[in-house]
Image (tube, rainbow, N blue to C red):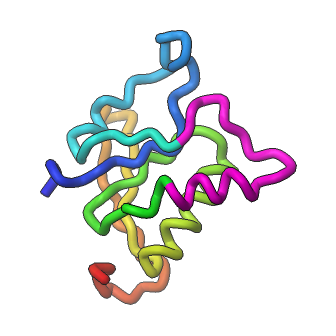
Amino acid sequence: MKDESTVYVVQEISGTREGRPKFNIMGASEFGKLKFLLDERSQMIFSPGPLIVKLKSLLKDFKPTDYLLLTGDPAIIGVVCCLISEQTNGRYNLLKWDRQEKKYYPIEIDLYGTGAKNDD
């Protein structure tokens, strides 16, 4: 199952363009193939519409077995979570970094407490 999964990384890690990312996220690849949605310079400032349209397109293939890795601009992270929630009836997976254990843990989000699978 993990071989088929994708880890949607919201934004490239700061410093990626210079070849010196601030931190290493390769541990997340244990949960699926990494797919970066936006480059590190992407911002949501005065006109979020075009960025939202782009994100909708990039997230259209998100599956119940996929994960979100919430990196980058908090405003963009918020929009990505909203878009995914809309698409999955509030059920999706996140990866959470544990500093003590130095590894990612999967977290299942079920916004509406339905417990229903989002296998449309």
Specify the segment rendered in magenta. Answer: 38-57
Side of 114 relative to 101 (left or right): right
Queried whether the magenta region covers residue 56, the answer comes back as yes
* Nearer-the-camera pick, 19 or 94: 19
Q: Is 22 or 58 nearer to us in this picture?
A: 58
Q: Nearer the viewer, residue 62 or 93?
A: 62
Q: Quadrant of residue 49?
A: bottom right
- Residue most toward the right? 46
Q: What percent of the width, then of the height, locates residue 13?
A: 52, 28
The residue shown at (41%, 69%) is 109
Looking at the image, residue 41 lies above or below residue 1: above
Give percent across and percent down for residue 100.
35, 34
Q: Look at the image and tell me in which quarter the C terminus lies.
A: bottom left
Q: Give the quadrant of the N terminus.
A: bottom left
Please tell me which residue is depicted at 45% across the width and 23% down the height of the picture: 23
Percent across and percent down for residue 113 are 42, 85
Q: Is residue 116 above or below residue 43?
A: below
Residue 105 horizontal side relative to residue 91, left or right? left
Report which quarter residue 110 is drawn in. bottom left
Q: Is residue 30 left or right of residue 107?
A: left
**What residue is drawn where x is 21% and y is 40%?**
30
